[in-house]
Amino acid sequence: MSNTTFTYDYSAAQNEEAERIMRKYSGEEKQYSDIEKLQKLDRKAETPGMIAAMTVGIIGTLIMGTGMSLVMVFGNMVTGIVLGIVGIGIMLLAYPVWKKVTKSSREKVRAEVMQLGEKIRNGQ
């Protein structure tokens, strides 16, 4: 029987993840790089539009589903069809809502994004 040992080195991604988790518990605040700040700003601008669009889409889906239930389960054709069409109409509004809210959010962070983007592009 041979006495061999096995060693394993974690990948860079795993080491980075371990360090990130350890920082949360050590109380140290992370210093973000410019590209990380830029990514954070981009997410900050995109998130409200996505939440608004998802909310509108879900409400439309529930209304359409209620209409379908009225038709299929209760046999109430007229009310069910009307509710189904209203629900589809509300779902169709999800994209314009996303577009409008995201545009507004992007306007709020535009100056900071442009400043950081120029800084990164110029290598400062």
Image (cartoon, rainbow, N blue to C red):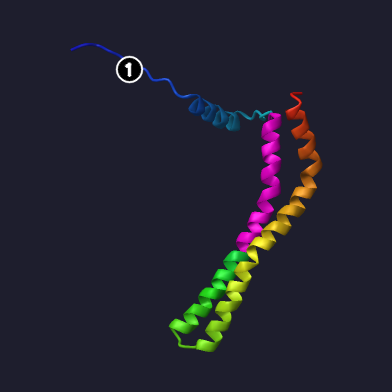
Q: Quadrant of residue 72?
A: bottom left
81 shown above or below 91 = below
Left or right of 25: which side holds 44?
Answer: right
Quick check: 1 above or below 60? above
Q: Position of residue 44 (x, y in %)?
A: 69, 46
Please name the residue shown 47% across and 79% down the image: 69
Q: Residue furthest front?
A: 121
Q: Which residue is mark 1?
A: 6
Looking at the rendered structure, the secondary structure element under dot 1 is loop
Residue 78 image point, x, y percent: 54, 88
Magenta stretch containing residue 16, yes or no? no
Q: In the displayed orientation, state which residue is furthest to the left.
A: 1
Q: Give the residue at the far right of this rendering.
A: 111
Q: Position of residue 14 (x, y in %)?
A: 48, 28
How many marks on residues? 1
Range of residues picked out in magenta: 32-55
Name which quarter of the figure residue 73 lies in: bottom left
Q: In front: 16, or 105?
A: 105
Q: Quadrant of the N terminus?
A: top left
Question: In the rendered view of the protein, which quadrant contains the C terminus?
Answer: top right
Q: Nearer the viewer, residue 4 or 80?
A: 80
Q: Residue at x 70, y 37 (%)?
A: 38
Q: Position of residue 79 (x, y in %)?
A: 55, 86
Circle 1: residue type = Phe
Q: Quadrant of residue 57?
A: bottom right
In this orientation, which residue lies closer to the viewer: 28 or 110? 110
Dot 1: within a 10 Å radius of its alpha carbon, few (fewer than 14), some, or many (20 or more) residues? few
Decide whether the magenta segment is chiefly helix, strand or loop: helix
Lateral position of residue 21 relative to residue 115, left or right: left
Residue in the picture at 71% in, 30% down: 34
